[in-house]
Image (cartoon, rainbow, N blue to C red):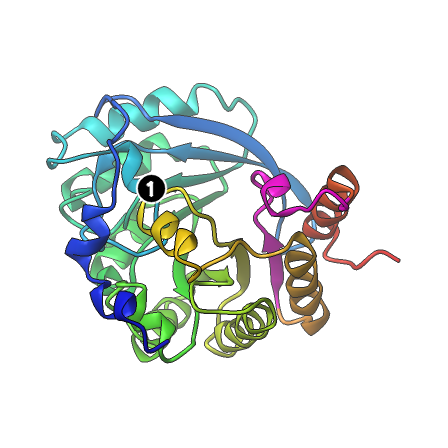
Amino acid sequence: MNDPVRRLITGSWILSKRGKKNPVDPFVPYGWLVEKERSASGTIDDMAIVFLTNRECPFHCLMCDLWKNTTDEVIPEGAITTQIDIAIKNFPGVRHIKLYNSGSFFDPKAIRPSEFERIAVLLKDFETVIVESHPAFINENVLQFRDLLKPRLEVAVGLETIHPQILPLLNKKMDTERFGKAAKFLTSHNIQTRSFILLKTPYMSEDEGIQWAQRSIDFAFNAGVECCTIIPVRAGNGAMDYLKDNGLFSLPAISSIEKVLEYGIRLGKGRVFADTWDLGLFATPNDSVDEITQRIHNMNLTQCIPA
């Protein structure tokens, strides 16, 4: 890891490698969908996912590509409630919803606390509301929003990796201690916590990617997290493409996604999911992509490992 490129990786360097953003409307979510998810109680339910258009996250993480659908300026007051109102009309009968805003829900420059009450009214017919946040924004605002909600609140927090040299390299501006404090704050206030775990960051071999993802899952569960989602690291944001082109990063194998998912499920400490978006990206010509994708999908839903 002692190479000249590593010493160049800063927020400004990451920004310099980017392409153009996609055109977005601050009053319209840039996407929504419904997918199946296994609940903590064991049922398999529909989950609505809304991708809210918002200002760019202030943390320019090395692996992130969510900036592509963000604005450069703080969006107008009322824009988020308008977006949610538009999206939820597409989810009749769905009881659970994720609101992802390409950053932190509790960043006051992304979603103003003054809008919490109006958002809570729009979400009153759901049973579960899941939002995401950087540990830096886990504070009393979380409790304010929770107390306004009729549904149960869950918060997803990116742990990414516990590798002591790689985590600082990601430019996330957090460490495992800060993650642990955020998880403790949430769980001590009876707010269920999720975590994102990266599989195979830059500067990791295939075996190291598996090992550190597994160790990161262990850490998350020991910190009180109830659910972990494994995210295989991709290129496509500029900085990751540069590292890939220079032999400092390669995509994880689809078999590694299976191995880490199986490991997490076998622990039996909480739900473990693998991100199934575009799994063919991680396959070789010899892999049966459809078969493996279905196997991973089944493990996500059943939390069991098939023969």
Q: Range of the magenta residues?
A: 270-287
Q: How many marks?
A: 1
Q: Position of residue 86 (x, y in %)?
A: 35, 20
What kind of element bears circle 1?
A: helix
Q: Is residue 244 above or below residue 97?
A: below
Q: Position of residue 10 (x, y in %)?
A: 20, 62
User: In the image shown, does 186 or 58 lie closer to the viewer?
Assistant: 58
User: In the image shown, does 159 or 150 lie closer to the viewer?
Assistant: 159
Q: In which quarter of the view is residue 297 placed?
A: top right
Residue under the image location 58 percent in, 75 percent down: 211
Q: Is residue 3 above or below residue 157?
A: below
Q: Is residue 275 magenta?
A: yes
Q: Position of residue 107 (x, y in %)?
A: 20, 51
Q: Is residue 107 magenta?
A: no
User: In the image shown, does 202 or 130 lie closer to the viewer?
Assistant: 202
Tag 1 residue: 66
Left or right: residue 132 versus residue 47 is left
